[in-house]
Image: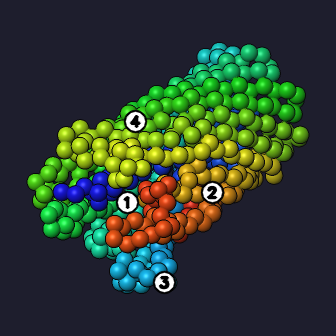
Amino acid sequence: MKKTGFILALAALIGIAPLAFANGLNLNSLGTRALTMGGAFVALADDFSAVYWNPAGLAKFTSKAFGLYGTDILPSGTYKLTIPSSWPYLPLVSPGGPTPVDTKTQKKNYFGGMGTYIHPINEKLVAAISVYTPSGLGASWDGSQLAFVSGGNPGIDWMSKIGLLTIAPALAYKVNDRLSLGAALNVNYGMFDIKMHAGKADISPALLQFDLGQYEESDTGWGVGATFGIIYKATDTTSFGLTVRTPSTVSFSGTAKIANLPTLNLPGSSSVDRKVTWPLWIALGMSVHPSDKFTFNIDAQYTKWSTIDKLEADYQDTVWATLMATRATPYSEPKSVVPMRWGDGLQLRFGAEYMLTKALAIRAGYYSDPSPAPDGTLNILLPSFDFSVVTFGLGYSFGSLKIDAGIEYLSGAERDILFLRTFRHPQIPNPLFDYNYERAMPGTYNMKIVVPNISISYKF
């Protein structure tokens, strides 16, 4: 069997799992109050979401408290593949015309949340335990509209779903009225599922194209990291905060399947292992509280996405391992290695809160969220975008009970990957082909995301 088509399809999958960790789909906001202030919360961190934003903020609690946060992430994406109508080989590649794919994501709900219990031990030391989902998204497409990229097979499912659940015990210590320190241990449990077309294989000696059918993969894994924070109250109206979240490597294990591979007397499934690292995150914030009614926050949040430069998968079945050890071209990495070439990212976040009454607050915020992923790694299952994000929310207090509600809207900048930059065929010349794009999925991508959310907290 000629392995090129088979391996190319599998190799693309290795790079898909960690894309949801990218800020293009990782909303990086937990807790309604923090989210509706644009996620600029590192220097304030005065509610139950402090475990995530800055555990030093827990030192502000003088009584027991708990909080619950829930969100429904609603992505809406479009994908359009266009082949130049003037290209002389268009009838051979796409007999149906220059636009073989024009589709949009199916409507799906991706739920996330957070639950935190806070317990002051004494006047200076506060403990907390929190469970939350820092990542939880995916994409689902109508397979009948993707027949062109599924080898003409309209029955192929295209979907991805990823989630990360973090269990975080935390401690905060109030050094004095100006300075607080905090730390949290992050025990991460990751989940990943994907379905897509497995590609085609050339069968010698007749060089027949054999459709490998549906590809499915399901993985889970564990990892450990930590979060450290400092809050310094420089004046009665101004505070500064610093948070450092260490890298956390999650060791995924699961099973990969290809529906039609047994027809070729080859194993239809293989155990697969991979290690994916959530990179270093550093955030510096300032909170200004010039009056009892108004608070303004600003954050600069840095993520070392360049940690994700290459990704490797270890297939336990010997046949699969042999196939994935080959190279598509002398210029390519082995198929078990996917070059990602991500770049570091810097988010600038702004948020404000205004107390209309002693019980009712109105909040708004904005942040820019650049994509770390270059065009050469883009695909339809978990694409990455430069997002502009606006947030809005309200909060109301009933004594010790607080209810916050809000919405976040992410508008992604369009991304366009030229078909001729990625197309390669042994019998069709293409001088525009770029090896840096051989893992990319060509087309025009757009994405909007709406995130309604609510929080309930109580002090007792």
**Colour logic:** rainbow
Please tell me which of labels 3 and 4 falls first in the chain. Answer: 3
Residue 159: mark: 1
Q: Secondary structure at mark 4?
A: strand
| Distance CA(mark 3)–CA(mark 4) | 43 Å
Asked whether residue 289 appears in the rendered view, the answer is yes
Residue 275: mark: 4
Question: Measuring 61% from the left and 16% from the top, which residue is drawn there?
Answer: 121
| Distance CA(mark 3)–CA(mark 2) | 29 Å
Q: Are marks 2 and 4 in contact (CB under 8 Å)?
A: no
Q: Which residue is denoted by mark 3 in the rendering?
A: 85
Residue 386: mark: 2
Please tell me which of labels 3 and 2 falls first in the chain. Answer: 3
> Residue 80 at x, y = what percent?
49, 73
Of the two numbered discs 3 and 4 in the rendering, the one whose residue sits closer to the viewer: 3
* Near-viewer residue (430 or 172): 430
